Image (cartoon, rainbow, N blue to C red):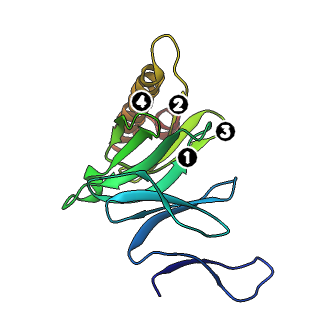
Amino acid sequence: EGQIKKVSINGGAPVPIVPAVNASGYAWEDDGTILFAEGDNILRVPEAGGKPEVIVASVKGRVQSLQLLPGKRTILFTVFPEGAANAEAEIVVRSLDTGQQQTLIRGGIAARYVPTGHLVYFAAGSLLAVPFAGTTGRRGALYGVGIGIVVALVYWTTMSIFAAVGAGGWISPMLAAW
């Protein structure tokens, strides 16, 4: 019907919130804000309805997995570049204040920031978590992201090597699993 609607948990008729002909990447934030992508824009609208506000313009590709990070000034999302496969998806963050956008992970999808301070996402059939600093420190926000990604890659590589060595029978399965 070309609309975003809500339904009470207690049942009842769907209530239209906003027209959205070709929307994707929905997220309902704790403060009642609904985020969605339509065309090449990311928009937000109050859960009570109203006119949607463009918060990110000109995204090149299909957007999914939207989430406002703590402080509500940075948005995390997955973008599938036009004509690209899932392996080429990008997890990005974008400042709502400056418009600066940074690709965090190539080949990852469905990232979520969790209260433990980690970024949880899927890549190559695995669920991964890396430490994520949503605020800037002396070395900048991306320093913590970079360290977290390096730690995750070292772990992933080590586990892959031990799995291959164990499957090949070169060491006992108990040692490979350890």
Residue type highlighted by circle 3: Pro
> Where does label 2 land, which residue?
132
At 36% from the left and 39% from the top, the residue drawn is 105
Q: Give the residue at mark 4.
A: 149
Relative side of 93 to 49, left or right: left
Q: Position of residue 27 (x, y in %)?
A: 56, 60
The secondary element bearing badge 4 is classed as: helix
**Judging from the image, what secondary structure is the residue with disc 2 in?**
loop
First-in-chain label (3 vs 2):
3
The kind of residue tagged 4 is Ile
Residue 128 seen by the camera:
no
Lower sequence index among marks 1 and 4 = 1
In three-dimensional space, the C-alpha distance between marks 1 and 2, rounded to whole angstroms, equals 14 Å
Instruction: Count all numbered tags in the image, as a single digit.
Output: 4
Q: Which residue is mark 1?
A: 68
In the displayed structure, does residue 83 sit left or right of residue 120? left
Dot 2 crowding, Cα within 10 Å, few <14, some 14–19, many 20+: many
Residue 137 in the image: state x and y as whole percent.
53, 15
Which residue is tagged 3? Answer: 115
* Three-letter residue code for mark 1: Leu
Q: Residue at x 49, y 44 (%)?
A: 75
Instruction: Looking at this view, name the residue that lies furthest to the right.
Output: 10
Residue 84 seen in render: yes
Alpha carbon of mark 1 to alpha carbon of mark 4: how far? 21 Å
- Earlier residue among tags 1 and 2: 1
For discs 2 and 4, the disc positioned in front in the rendered view? 2
